[in-house]
């Protein structure tokens, strides 16, 4: 395992410095790809609820790191950070908790060159400070937080490239998901330690507190549902048969007028996929991706299956049972995103707490997730209609 692939959660100062440089290099490469395609300025970016103007993202990432590291913020509210931003209006432009999404296209932002200079100066100051930090969880917490934040936004920027049909940077092509493992794995069930606790390196607030959880025996797909399995659902009228869709799912379906997954296109009898603006032939054996929770639940109803719960998924992931692999795509679960018992928000209070109950938990990772971010305990969460993310699902026996 290389230095950049080790988990960021326990990384020391030297490792963190390398990871922070790597994350910023990736951010800038993605921004430059979007800029070259004509999306560098906010006015040129479609006003979609699933994207941010890339120029705003660039400034926000540097501002977030400055807020929690250089300005030593103890929380996410105004007045909880020391001093002022290196940008005269940085707090007005880039505080995501105070700047509504819809307004980010109309801000009087600095030009790209000035924001890149800001990014460079913030990173240089962070690395200088990091070199003098002790190797303790308390001292390194804000650095690990800022790194995780930039890595997650990096994956979101790749979603934006897919949404806008932009090819990724030549040096940073997204890996293709590996072939799907066939069959089903029976798990005997039992107790396991879910989540994380202080003293185990960096832990997201929504992963605490670690507690022993018991799950009943269950049988789970060894791999993700494939394009071919989805084609069978479609050919059997899956999108047209109301009995497979809940009331909420039917309402979503009617609003979308959907008859195939996002980015699928048909040419006669053949199906193709749009991948970063390129049209590629559908591979029936490849894992399905870009489906909403509504679609995943409908397929399970059609197949006489169900989605796994968060607890079942984590049990399977930590069990290391032969045949169970994960990480090709994020995976929808049957669980709404809710706090564990004993939850307390961390300094970045807007990370989890505002979204409990309105989001669905997804687990795993995708091909676009940096290796250092991958963890069986990591909880991602999105609204049920999101299908622009690199997400699929696997199913459980009823």
Image: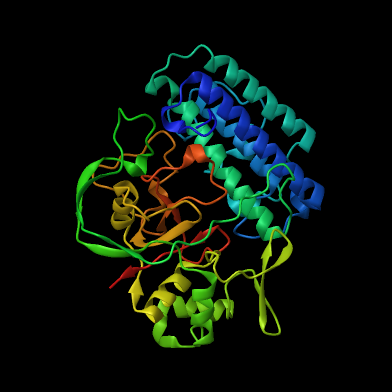
Vertical position of residue 228 compared to residue 67: above or below: below
Vertical position of residue 211 compared to residue 231: above or below: above
Vertical position of residue 12 compared to residue 150: above or below: above
Q: Nearer the viewer, residue 366 or 343?
A: 366
Q: Nearer the viewer, residue 157 or 107?
A: 157
| Figure quadrant of residue 204 | top left
Pick out the residue farthest to the top.
132
- Residue 234 appears left or right of 162: left
Residue 280 appears in the figure: yes
Q: How is the image coloured?
A: rainbow
| Figure quadrant of residue 357 | bottom left
Q: Position of residue 239 (x, y in %)?
A: 51, 83
Q: Position of residue 39 (x, y in %)?
A: 77, 51
Residue for point 29% across, 42% down: 343
Residue 99 appears in the figure: no
- Residue 132 appears left or right of 312: right
Q: Position of residue 41 (x, y in %)?
A: 77, 47
Residue for point 49% across, 87% down: 236
Number of labelled discs?
0
Q: Position of residue 14 (x, y in %)?
A: 52, 19
> What quarter of the picture does the C terminus occupy?
bottom left
Residue for point 48% across, 84% down: 238
């Amino acid at each position: 395992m290389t230095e950049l692939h080790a988990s960021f959660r326990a990384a020391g100062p030297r490792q963190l410095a390398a990871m922070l440089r790597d994350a910023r290099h990736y951010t800038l490469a993605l921004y430059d790809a979007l800029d070259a395609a004509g999306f560098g300025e906010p006015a040129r970016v479609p006003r979609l609820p699933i994207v941010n103007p890339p120029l705003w993202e660039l400034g926000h990432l540097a501002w977030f790191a400055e807020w929690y590291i250089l300005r030593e913020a103890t929380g996410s509210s105004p007045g909880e950070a020391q001093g002022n931003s290196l940008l005269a209006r940085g707090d007005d432009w880039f505080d995501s908790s105070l700047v509504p999404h819809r307004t980010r296209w109309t801000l009087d932002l600095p030009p790209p060159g000035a924001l890149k200079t800001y990014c460079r100066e913030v990173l240089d100051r962070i690395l200088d400070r990091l070199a003098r930090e002790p190797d303790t969880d308390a001292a390194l917490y804000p650095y690990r937080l800022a790194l995780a934040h930039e890595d997650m936004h990096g994956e979101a920027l790749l979603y934006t490239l897919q949404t806008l049909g932009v090819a990724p940077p030549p040096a940073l092509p997204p890996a293709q998901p590996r072939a799907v493992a066939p069959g089903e794995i029976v798990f005997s069930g039992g107790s396991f330690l879910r989540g994380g606790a202080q003293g185990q390196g960096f832990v997201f607030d929504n992963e605490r507190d670690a507690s022993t959880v018991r799950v009943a025996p269950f049988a789970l797909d060894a791999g993700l549902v494939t394009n071919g399995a989805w084609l069978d659902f479609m050919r059997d009228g899956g999108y047209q048969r109301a009995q497979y869709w809940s009331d909420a799912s039917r309402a979503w379906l009617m609003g979308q007028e959907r008859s195939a997954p996002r980015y699928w296109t048909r040419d006669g009898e053949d199906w193709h996929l749009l991948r970063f603006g390129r049209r590629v032939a559908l591979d029936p054996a490849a894992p399905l991706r870009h489906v909403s929770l509504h679609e995943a639940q409908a397929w399970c109803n059609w197949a006489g299956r169900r989605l796994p719960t968060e607890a079942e998924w984590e049990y399977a992931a930590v069990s290391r049972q032969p045949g169970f692999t994960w990480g090709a795509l994020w995976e929808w679960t049957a669980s709404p995103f809710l706090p564990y018992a004993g939850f307390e928000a961390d300094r970045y209070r807007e990370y989890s707490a505002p979204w409990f109950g309105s989001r669905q938990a997804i687990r795993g990772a995708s091909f676009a997730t940096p290796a250092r971010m991958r963890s069986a305990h990591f909880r991602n969460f999105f609204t049920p209609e999101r299908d622009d993310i690199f997400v699929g699902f696997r199913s459980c026996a009823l």
